[in-house]
Image (cartoon, rainbow, N blue to C red):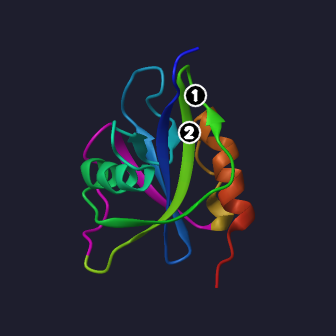
């Protein structure tokens, strides 16, 4: 059995909205929506990977807040772990810099208006269940 590799996803929340990112690559995922993020590199904590990936993919300064319960298998050997995250004060607005061609801020009522990647659906459900908009 190969060692599993953690992929972190960010449930980036701001003003009661969740950020969704539309994939532009690879072709089999293009046009579908995901929680932004990426692979944890050797020697990196998942929280550090999340902050780095959000900086690379979206050009934002963010901070991991808390881990969303659960872990979801991707193609072997990858597993998805999701953290809620927030933008740091003074961060730029997110832009689709890498692997994405569009971003949308979704309110709780709009959460299912986009075609989420299958592996992100359970994580989005967990985020929605825990979501308390003040």
Q: Is residue 93 magenta?
A: yes
Horizontal side of residue 97 vs 100, given as left or right: left
Q: Position of residue 102 (x, y in %)?
A: 37, 47
Specify start and end residues of the magenta stretch as a single range: 91-107
User: How far apart are the alpha carbons under marks 2 and 1?
Assistant: 7 Å
The residue lying toward the viewer, choosing from 105 and 81, is 81
Q: Are marks 2 and 1 in contact (CB under 8 Å)?
A: yes
| Tag shown at residue 74 | 1
Q: Is residue 95 magenta?
A: yes
Classify residue 79 by image quadrant: top right
**Quarter of the N terminus within the rendering:** top right
- State the residue at coordinates (25%, 46%): 97
Q: Position of residue 10 (x, y in %)?
A: 48, 54
Asked if residue 35 is positioned above or below residue 106 in the image, the reply reads above
Q: Position of residue 6 (x, y in %)?
A: 49, 37
The residue lying toward the viewer, choosing from 128 and 69, is 69
SS for dot 2 = strand
The mark nearer the N terminus, 2 or 1, is 1
- State the residue at coordinates (36%, 33%): 24
SS for dot 1 = loop
Asked if residue 94 is positioned above or below residue 24 in the image, the reply reads below
Q: Residue placed farthest to the right in the image? A: 129
- In this rendering, the count of numbered labels is 2
| Tag shown at residue 80 | 2
| Tag shown at residue 60 | none
């Amino acid at each position: 059995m190969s060692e599993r590799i953690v992929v972190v996803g960010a449930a980036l929340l701001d003003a009661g909205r969740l950020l969704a990112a539309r994939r532009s690559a690879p072709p089999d995922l293009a046009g579908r929506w995901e929680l932004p993020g990426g692979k944890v590199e050797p020697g990196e904590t998942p929280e550090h990977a999340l902050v780095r990936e959000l900086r690379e993919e979206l050009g934002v300064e963010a901070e991991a807040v808390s881990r969303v319960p659960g872990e979801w298998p991707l193609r072997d050997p990858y597993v998805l772990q999701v953290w809620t995250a927030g933008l740091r004060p003074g961060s730029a607005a997110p832009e689709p810099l890498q692997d994405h061609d569009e971003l949308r801020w979704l309110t709780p009522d709009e959460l299912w208006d986009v075609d989420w990647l299958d592996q992100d659906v359970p994580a989005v459900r967990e985020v929605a269940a825990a979501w308390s908009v003040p």
